[in-house]
Image: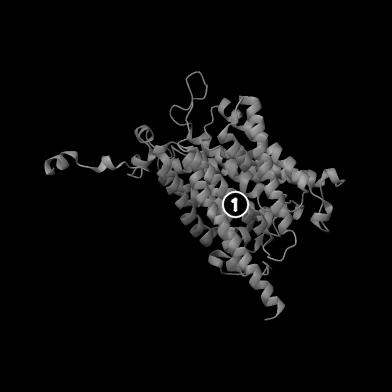
Amino acid sequence: MDMATLSKGLDTIWVVLTAAMILLMEGGFALLEAGFVRQKNAVSIIMKVFVDITFGALIFYFFGFGLMYGKDAGGLIGTSGFMLGGDLSHIKLNISHDTFWLFQCAFVIAVISIVSGAVAERIHFRAYILYTIVMTGFIYPLAGHWVWEVDGWLYKLGMIDFAGSAVIHALGGFSALAAAIFIGPRIGKFMPDGKAGIVPPSNLPLASVGAFILWFGWFGFNSGSTLSATNGSIGHIAVTTMLAASAGGAACILFTMFRYQKADPPMVINGSLAGLVGITAGCSFVSDGAAIFIGIVCGIAMVFATEMLERRRIDDPVGAFAVHGISGSLGTLAVGLFAKPELLGAGHAYGLFYGGGWKLLGVQALGLATVSVWGFALTWAAFWLIRKAMPVRVSKDEELIGLDVGIHGVPAYNQEHDFLDLDRLKAEN
């Protein structure tokens, strides 16, 4: 076996394995969101995750991948690669197009899962399916084309987003914000005086396990974005990922102890996730110390963002915008400050704090604003159009009884006595 064949085989194994790690994150999303919502809506969370995976993969295969990585038209949109056919000769990687599609498919499924949590407990299932098609087939692919395809207009400007703080998390977070505002808060979430009511999570241990699975999958998310098993930066990427997540969680432990006089478990869970989101753009290009700083800032900013949403009567049950929108934004901008020239390689502008000037920070800000506004506006427009055809929100009765029974016809947790015919048993005994 020659070295070229061996290298291609190793890269293929690496990308497939890391794609599988990212897909496992859907289990993390499912457990995290099911633990954060009330027991009567746990099944609805699982069903939405299945929509993310099934519809998301199919739509990305038929349409999304071609729009994202197909032959470029004006730096705005791809025009080939639908169903992995047509001209894809411009994609020059050491892996097959099939392998590359699988990795990118795992990413698009993660994007729609961000929005899922923000509309938990009140979105209509059929409306969610339609929105999933729009997000995975159009909204995300075009944003990805601008930033990641070599002929995309933001890529040509020099925007750096290694694994998706902007393309995935800021886009998903601002889309989640639009969806949460459009659909409105849950019944009983806000009092007549505007104060937020307490809607306690159903199962924080379950949510914690979900966060740990997401943390594990993030090593595939970030390190896998090298698309090569022999890339020398894999170890550094894994270290910065770990440090940022730990710093985000630790910062939330200390900050909530100071602010609320107790360590707040949901905030701590989301703090670690905020650190992970924040480091995703620059994990390959910033130092260990910068990764810790990014994690701390993202963790604390997430707390303030969560409080801000409640003051504005915006109901986001799992903190999707605070974790993904805010931390994704901060992480994208942090690249413009902390990107080291020796880690970027030749031909790239580098961070302001390393003498690189304002150019990279300006490009990062432009790209962030573009994808954030794109996600928010297109999500709002999508739900406005969907509402013309069907209800976007469940009925009051369905929401009060819970989406598990009201929409899906089955509760998440059943007690044996619920199904026993007591009169029949008494007669038989």
Q: Nearer the viewer, residue 81 or 36?
A: 36
Q: Mark 1 points at which residue?
A: 216
Rendering coords of residue 427 (x, y %)? 12, 41
Q: Which residue is pictured at 65% across the width and 50% down the height?
A: 164
Instruction: Look at label 1 and name its amino acid.
Output: Phe
Q: Which residue is pictured at 66% across the width and 68% down the height?
A: 11
Residue sticking out furthest to the right: 355
Residue sticking out furthest to the front: 429
Residue count near mark 1 (Cα–Cα under 10 Å), binned few <14, some 14–19, many ≥20: some
Rendering coords of residue 284 (x, y %)? 74, 53
| Residue 365 in view here | no
Q: In which quarter of the image is residue 396?
A: top left
Q: Quadrant of residue 245?
A: top right
Rendering coords of residue 137 (x, y %)? 53, 54
Q: Which residue is pictured at 68% across the width and 38% down the height?
A: 298
Secondary structure under tag 1 reads helix
Query: Left of 372 or right of it: where is 49?
Result: left
Q: Which residue is pictured at 45% across the width and 52% down the height?
A: 50
Query: Left of 410 or right of it: where is 131?
Result: right
Rendering coords of residue 247 (x, y %)? 69, 41
Residue sticking out furthest to the bottom: 1
| Residue 288 in view here | yes
